[in-house]
Amino acid sequence: MTKKKDFPVVPITTFLKNAQRILKNPLPFHHENFEEQGDTFRLILGGGNSVVFSRDAAFAQYVLQKNQKNYTKSDIQTKDLAKYVGRGLLTAEGDHWRKQRRLIQPAFHKKQLAQLIQTMDEAICQALTKVKPNTKADIFPVFNDLAFETVVKALFSNAATPEEISRLQYITEAAQKMLVKELRQPYKAWWFKLSGSIKKHVGLTQEAREILKKIVATRKKSGERKDDLLDMLLDARYDDDTAMDDEQLIDEILILFTAGHETTSNALTFTTALLARHPEVQQRIYEEITQARATSTHLFEFLKACTYTQQVLDESMRLYPPAYFIDRVNLEDDEFEGVHIPKGTSLLFSMKEIHVHKEHWENSEQFDPERFSAENAKTHSSHYYPFGAGPRMCIGNNFAMYEMILAMAQLVEKYEIKKDTTAIEILPLITLKPKNAELTLVER
């Protein structure tokens, strides 16, 4: 019998030798293996477990789009994350996911989001008052608060008190930090349970659920319409004309908090850091925004006029994709380019590596927003995945882009980002986070 072809293998000895550096930052280790083994390799973890890592854009497209029905998300999302945020769009699978996607999709259409733009803009304006001009400081906390408060305002208008917003943000971030510990230190699973750490954080999540239930109940009782995301979700109906029950509604809201604020704050921080290193790009954004303000009669028109600002954000997310890995597991045996993929194989696609692959991008490490100009953008569609791909593509991609353009517009209008030439640092956790993003913003 002919032995079935497999991907190149990185042995467990290599994994164990690098365990400590992987714990701190796994990306250099993965990059070294990609350079040595090729665009796809299998990493042996021991105990009969292994993970296939890939930076092959064609393989990613096959799994995420062409044969997506044979692939599901891994336990990291469907079980580990779900215990903290419930079974919403991000963590659901199968028929449950399809049912929820059909229900919620209309709330995120561009026409619906147009109603929220003014609310988003006002939330951003308020959040940017926390900037301390002429002082070198880490800008990530400013954008982190901005993104969370924008999601809350878009969801609830003014229904949540500042104290509730602060508590919800703390709980959301605490749960994510706990999940990172569980994933990076699986050998401590017994301790996390014995010490009560997991129980404590699940309890915090329950506290968040109670806060949200109170807000939802108050809205229902008032009968008042705000035309925010909460109203849109309350209006949504399944095929049998029934609405979501409160538990499912809370699941979806928790997912919006989790997926909707950290990725956006990461992208805004990386973009600002890039502008500090490319003042000519910053100046061009300022000129575009000034012109768009002068010629636009409403915010939605202004957003459409900020084409170069969007190019800059696209290029920033190419270099620093917030969702830097996408995971899948195949439901049945499969094959790609002659390589057998046994049922239940864990696959991890590195968006970070795909986005700087030299075969797809000229001067791939260079920051160049012109890659995403109208005439160039289409050439990258098969190897650019800032919001995922296929049916599971992020439902909030338009929301996030509107928010980021509005935030960049207000930031660059109000402040000049002082030039900085130091290297941009990263911290790969659940998402790709910026590290030590200390910059000086000078009032214009």
Image: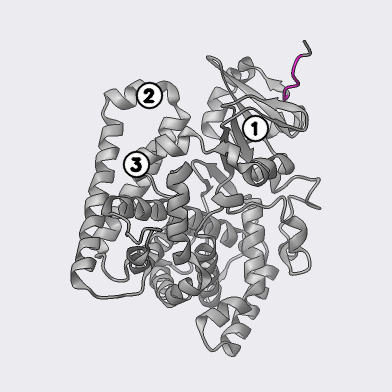
Report the magenta residues as a range: 3-7
Residue at label 2?
Answer: 189
Query: Identity of the amino acid at label 1?
Result: Phe
Circles 2, 3 touching at the beta carbon (< 8 Å): no
Q: Magenta stretch mostly in which secondary structure?
A: loop
Say if 306 sits above or below 396 in the image: below
Q: CA distance from mark 1 to mark 2?
A: 24 Å
Quarter assignment of residue 186: top left
Quarter assignment of residue 169: bottom left
> In the image, which is nearer the foreground, mark 2 or mark 3?
3
Q: Is residue 302 magenta?
A: no
Residue 86 placement, left or right of 143: left
Q: Which of the labelled discs sits on residue 84, or is there none?
A: 3
Q: Residue sitting at 52 percent across and 38 percent down?
A: 73
- Label 3: how many residues lie within 10 Å, few (<14), some (14-19) or many (20+)? many
Tell me the quarter of the image containing the N terminus. Answer: top right
Say if 207 sits above or below 25 in the image: below
Disc nearer the start of the sequence (1/3): 1
269 or 388, nearer to the observer: 388
Q: Residue sitting at 31 percent across and 33 percent down?
A: 198
Query: Identity of the amino acid at label 2?
Result: Ala
Q: Looking at the image, can residue 203 be seen?
A: yes
Disc nearer the start of the sequence (2/3): 3
Say if 224 sits above or below 187 in the image: below
Q: Residue sitting at 44 percent across and 27 percent down?
A: 185
The image's colouring method is one colour
